[in-house]
Image: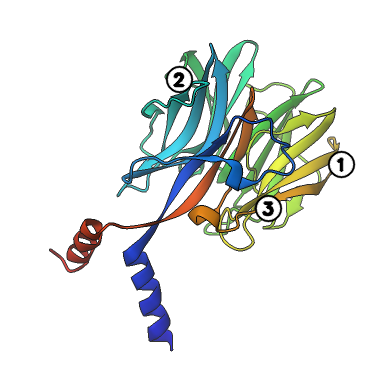
Amino acid sequence: HHLKKIGEIKMKKLICFEQYILLINFENLPIFSLRLAEFKKIIPSRDRFWADPFIVYEGGTYYIFVEEVVFPSRRGHISYISLDANGHLSASKIVIQQPYHMSYPFIFQYNGEYYMIPETSANRTIELYKCIGFPDKWELSTILMRDIVAADATVFFREGQWWLYANISENEGTPSNDELFLYYTDDLFSGNWTPHQKNPIISDVNSSRPAGKIFYHEGTLFRPSQNSSKRYGYGLKINQITAVSATDYHEECVANIDPTGEGGIVAVHTLNFEHGLVVTDALLKRFRNPAEIIRLILRRCGF
């Protein structure tokens, strides 16, 4: 029985592969009841994937910053693609690359300047980059935190205070999807972050990990999060933040965005929107062509 199951799994991996792509929509969609079937697929070439999209709208053009991984490497770097209002897409261009894995290019504007906090947990840091020539010239501005394994750091500024959310692995080898930690400071660049009294503020694989920018809607604060209950980054939740202070934190889920398998989409795990464009990433199940299957068999046989 076990040999049969193993054989089925290996056969599926031989015939199919999974690739992160982007889904976009220019419609004025209700953000709390998105239907993935209404999105247009942007599929990179078969030698890479794009994930964790963040949007900047500048000069009539959408710049979508992504984690890009080029196979067979597993090390991600930060790239961008540009998109005009007619849907014309540019080739991807690398903007930040380090000798360690990078993902989740959380980009924001402060005092008229663009900054980015890509995930650099492989380097045990939370790094802040400043844009010195938009969109493709960035330099390391400061290290926000050191000696920390932090996933998908997400910040927002509210009433004179910076808040930083991140999933933390407190012990070597422990999962990074389960527990959400919160920190705050009044100086983004100081490196002095105070841990929240209730850390971890969420201990739930269904909703802890950040999944995009925190946003206001009709005066209320919302936080997108990943639902990794079925697999890593299976679906999305939108949570209403009802209390955030130095001593208290509370949020409640108000919407779920889950894949249905329609169109080969088996997972979604980051959501952002800007100036009429909604973008998410999606894990797409694709069939290999015969030439790919033959090359894979030969490689596994040592040829």
Q: Looking at the image, can residue 141 be seen?
A: no
**Image location (x, y in percent) of residue 61:** 51, 17
What residue is pinned by disc 1?
Answer: 248
User: Vertically, is 201 above or below 16?
Assistant: above
Question: Residue 20 or 155: which is nearer the viewer?
Answer: 20
> What's under tag 1, amino acid-wise?
Asp
* Quadrant in the picture for residue 219: top right
Q: CA distance from mark 1 to mark 3?
A: 16 Å
Mark 1, other Cα within 10 Å: few <14 / some 14–19 / many ≥20: few
Q: CA distance from mark 1 to mark 2?
A: 35 Å
> What's under tag 2, amino acid-wise?
Glu
In the image: residue 55, left or right of residue 216:
left
Of callouts 1 and 3, the N-terminal one: 3
What residue is pinned by disc 3?
Answer: 179
What residue is pinned by disc 2?
Answer: 139
Residue reaching furthest to the left: 303
Residue lying at 68% horizontally and 30% vertically, measured from the top left: 28
